[in-house]
Amino acid sequence: MKLIKAFLVTLVSLCMFGCSADEPKISATFNQAATLVGDLPANPLQWQVITSSANKADSTMSTLYGNDAAVKYARTTSQHDYPGGSVLSLVTWTQREDERWFGANIPDQARSVEFVSVTVSADGRPSYSYEDYEGTPLKRMPPSNGTPTNDRVSYLLSQRAAVMP
């Protein structure tokens, strides 16, 4: 019995004091590289997430954010006719390996920030405005007329909300 007690005391002592107090602590840091720097009309990082995706071919990751009206609509319906006042923003970052988590990737530099704003005219028809910001710092790109802009607006509006627990 004394042998078992001595073994248990030794085991408990090793468990309590087995880790050295001199090991360096890893402090939490903020990912400064992923911040949005530039002349944006709003900071989408302060909005709620609608969905996210990663593009392995481009080594990019994107998050679609929305203001309160857009998020409420996206989470309650599968339709894509957002109400007036909705604003969506797709932020796309390049990726880099996470130094703290083997095999994980985290956002690095912002590649682009796109905004789609929805307004509704008096006759009930929706209207969409599109803005694209690129570069370092982020600057508004000149509007392009035609299909590319319409395709981007359609793409952003068609994204379905991720299922949130």
Image: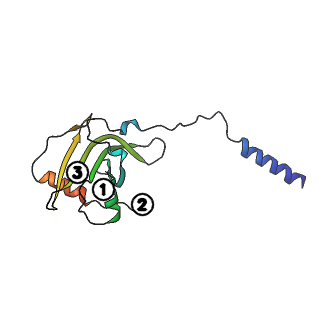
Badge 3 local density, few (<14 within 10 Å), some, or many (20+)?
many
Amino acid type, residue under disc 3 in the picture: Val
Q: Which residue is mark 2?
A: 164
Using the rendered view, name the quadrant where residue 74 is placed.
bottom left
Residue 125 in percent (x, y) is at: 15, 61
Task: Tell me the CA gap for discs 2 and 1.
Answer: 15 Å
Q: Is 150 located above or below residue 94 in the figure?
A: below
State which mark lies toward you, 2 or 1: 1
Pick the quarter of the image with the N terminus: bottom right
Residue found 35% across the figure and 45% down from its top: 45
Cα distance in 3D space between marks 3 and 1: 11 Å
Circle number at residue 116: 3
User: In what element is the residue under mark 2?
Assistant: loop
User: Which quadrant of the view contains residue 83?
Assistant: bottom left
Name the residue beneath numbered marker 1: 70
The residue mark sitting in front, 3 or 1, is 1
Q: Earlier in the sequence, mark 3 or mark 1?
A: 1
Q: Secondary structure at mark 3?
A: strand
**Pointers 2 and 3 in contact (C-beta within 8 Å):** no
**Splitting the image into 4 quarters, where does residue 84 fall?**
bottom left
